[in-house]
Amino acid sequence: MSSQGPRSFKSSRAFLVRSADSGETDRRLSFFTESEGLVHMTAKAALRSRKRFGGSLQKYFLLDVSWTETPGRNAILDSVSLLASYWEIVADWERVRHADYLLELAATMFPQPGPKPKAFRILLAEMKSLAGGEPPPAGARKAEAAFLSVGGWGPDLGECRGCGRPSGTLGKGGASAVRFSLADGRFSCGSCTGAGGISMSLGAVRTWKALQSSSPSLLRRLRIPDRILEELQQVIPRYLELHLGKSFRSLGGIEKG
Ligand SMILES: [Zn+2]
């Protein structure tokens, strides 16, 4: 039965997220694309495909992918070409784990079809940074904070939930720590003693807030001091898992390993 729907031809910059054999000869591929978000497609006839697409169908490559969509059918991969390689990632197991985590994170947080230019640029910036030797945990926290912000998950770090004082003005002659509520995504300043929450330094609050700008150049430039990174390790992944309602295996391995 051939579908009579109109075929459409698409192309986009993309990262390969997953790849698996399908049936005798095909491969099922999932790409995170800039123009269409997460796209699942089939590479027909693996042996022939390997010749056609061979070395390019790898993770950690920035690819230019073309595919055909027919209503009611799997999208079919037409061509793929290499735009940039971040293959330095495979030199180090921690980089591989974090790069895989970021790919899964992008696919999980932005599964809806449609253009994803901001999320894609964040992913691209962090792939570059990981390949360039950025410490993987810093890259992961940056990407998490930026993805959360782009996806509208917050948190709202602008002001104290109690007195409304802006986070930028806190700490002058007062306490240098706040209590952050994972569930609400808001904080209470030192003067507004709220029960519960996680203690966070103002430095950590401000760093997280800066990461929310999700500008790729800022993400690349920003150096997170070790002390603040340790704090953010304790809070951003937990916040993300709570608000996405999902626990990430690759992340769990990193945090508890
Ligand atoms: Zn307050």
Image: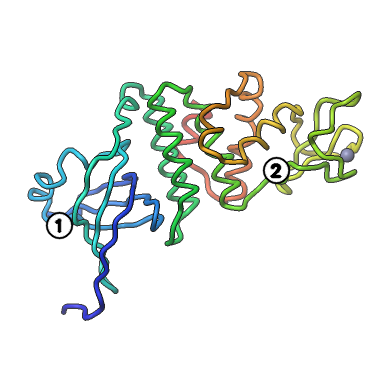
How far separated are the C-alphas under marks 1 and 2?
45 Å
Amino acid type shown at disc 1: Lys
Within 10 Å of disc 1 (Cα), the crowding (few <14, some 14-19, many 20+) is some
Residue at 63% across / 42% down in the picture? 239
The three-letter code of the residue at mark 2 reads Leu
Mark 2 sits on what residue?
A: 182
- Can you name the residue that lies furthest to the front here? 217
Q: Nearer the viewer, mark 1 or mark 2?
A: 1
Q: Nearer the viewer, residue 43 or 179?
A: 43
- The number of callouts visible is 2
Q: Residue at x 88, y 26 (%)?
A: 172
Whether tag 1 and tag 2 are in contact, CB under 8 A, the answer is no
Disc 2 C-beta below 8 A from ligand 1 = no
State left or right for residue 143 relative to residue 199.
Answer: left
Q: Position of residue 15 (x, y in %)?
A: 34, 44
Q: Position of residue 202 (x, y in %)?
A: 76, 29
Check disc 1 and report the residue beneath it. 44
**225 is higher (above) or lower (below) than 129:** above
Q: Which residue corresponds to the image point at 80% horizontal and 33% vertical from the top-left?
A: 178
Q: Residue 58, image x and y in percent?
A: 25, 39
Element at label 1: loop
- Between 38 and 1, the residue placed more toward the observer is 38
Ligand 1 image-quadrant field: top right
